[in-house]
Image (cartoon, coloured by chain):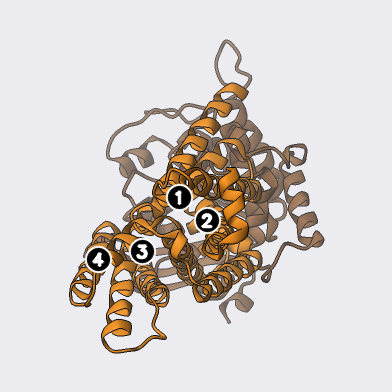
Chain colours: A orange, B brown
Amino acid sequence: MLQFLIDLQQFRFLQYALLTGIMASIACGIVGSYVTVRRMTYIAGAIAHCTLGGMGVAGYFSKEQGWTFLTPLTGATLAALLAALIIAYMLNRASMRLDTVLSAVWAIGMAIGIIFISKTGGYNEDLMSYLFGDILMVSDRDLLLIAALDLILAVVVFFLYNQLLAISFDEEFARISGIRVDLYNTVFLCLIALTVVLLVQVVGIILVVALLSLPAAAAGKLATRLPAMMLLAVFLSLVSTTGGLVISYVPNLPAGATIVIVAALLYLGCSFLEKFRR
Amino acid sequence: MDSSACPDIVVSFEQVDFSFNGEPVLLDVNLQIHDREMIGIIGPNGGGKTTLLRLILGQLQPDRGKILVFGQPPDKSSHRLGYVPQHMQFDSNFPVSVLDVVLMGLAGKSGPGPFSGKLKQTAELALASVDLLAYRTRPFAELSGGQRQRVLIARALASSPDMLLFDEPTANVDTSAGEKLYEILENLNRKMTILIVSHDIGFVNHHISSVVCVNQRVHVHPTSELAGHNIIDLYGHDMSLIRHDHRCSIKGHSTNAPVSD
């Protein structure tokens, strides 16, 4: 802990890591709460895995073709949004089996990513950092993009809160009462996509679903209204990301995995509190 | 416009056919619902009750024929309808308060951003009309089935509809809650038309002025006519009709209640 604080003042990468964790927690708590009450974790999982395609393609073109503007984070953002739009299109057409579509998006995105990464020169240490996250490698450009995504999320949720709540609670009634359910579902899936991109930076593709669902599910055990659930989920995510970063630092544990373990312990703690309270 | 010709008619079906995946669900439906009627839709499962409801709500389009709701095509008049779904279909862990649920009835009409104080007042008025204002900050999940049902009525009432449509209101609601429900419906019926889809023939028979029997084809009866032979036509077998009276003398019902024949 002390060593972490001393180094925090000294090393920029550590400051960036801390900031990334804080900003990702805001998105994670807000969107994670919607995802949890709508039981859409599997959709988030599909979008998360699909971002590997975007990162692989972006990495290939920036290294092999010299398109340095195309960072893996930009690639991941574009891939996640594309996946969200495809899923939204299918979701709004009831004739498709959603399960099949999600599995396809999940697998095709990963396959594209693996092919492009294998054709990109140099060591393939990238693949590991995409899959398991590397919060200590966030650049200042990444940080700016992360801040922008966070701002977009917060503004959209502030203005569309009521409509998003109504479609989450009862889609059929929302449709009858004149809410454009298809439009809001598309917006909602894009919010999930942006959140997933933020979380991939922190814990990597494979662990995104855990960080998206554990703090929100823990908060859901104690909160009785959605805004309270969101605030509590943001707080629990903050404790997970910051706590995980601090704990992992000195023994040099993988930060992403440590963060998820902290989140899981908080979830257990909240389950216990819930039992205790009733 | 048809509505100006006869302003009393709120819903009309003219020779409406509807099929699903090539299977006919409704055939040659002709139906008129008048202003401030309380009307029940009964029929066997798969007979087309819910389809009829969805056609009125504009959620489905007929294959043939013409449907008018308040003199307009259903998708243009859905804002004048209040829909009350079954209360059991909700996630019992969903984190919303009672007032949150009622406000959802206004989410289609309010613009972006938080609800104004005026809309909150509207929602509280709707909640008061189902006698649940004192519960406004309580979690929706903690209410009983009958209370949830009333919250959903308040949600439908929030947008001040001219007609209420119920899907199985008495399913999983105990008898005393059913009576409370009817009391509320009777009050509301003074101001608006009420349409109830129900399996519960007893409830419909006792409380409602006329009944639409749906089994692919549609027949309308005043409830006094709803005797055994109609039930046999409808369900294909005999059924007992049980009157849900509170007070019952030893000799039985005082009035001539319809019984199975």
The residues bearing labels 2 and 4 have C-alpha atoms spaced at a distance of 23 Å
Q: Earlier in the sequence, mark 3 or mark 2?
A: 2
Q: Does dot 1 land on a helix, a strand or a loop?
A: helix
Q: Are marks 3 and 1 in contact (CB under 8 Å)?
A: no
Q: Quadrant of residue A20?
A: bottom right
Dot in front, 3 or 4: 4
* Residue A28, numbered circle: 2
Residue B171: horizontal and vertical position, in percent? 48, 36
Which quarter of the figure is the C terminus of chain A placed in?
top right
Q: Provide the chain ID for the residue under circle 1.
A: A
A71 lies left or right of A98: right
Q: What's the mark number on residue A110?
A: 4
Q: Earlier in the sequence, mark 2 or mark 1?
A: 2
Ranked by sequence position, the earlier of labels 3 and 4 is 3
Q: Amino acid at mark 1?
A: Leu
**Residue B102's x, y, as percent?**
66, 51
Report the front residue among B176 and B104: B104
Mark closer to the chain start, 3 or 1? 3
Residue B34 sits above or below residue A212 on the image: below
Between the C-alphas of marks 3 and 2, the distance is 15 Å
Please name the amino acid that badge 3 sits on.
Ile
- Placement of A271 over or under B123, stated as above or below: above
Q: Which of these two is toward me, B145 or B96?
A: B96
Q: Which residue is mark 1?
A: A211
Q: Quadrant of residue B113?
A: bottom right
Q: Earlier in the sequence, mark 2 or mark 4?
A: 2
- Protein chain holding label 2: A
Q: Give residue A175's position: percent from left, percent from top.
A: 51, 64
Question: Label 1 vs label 4: CA separation?
Answer: 20 Å
- Quarter holding the N terminus of chain A? top right
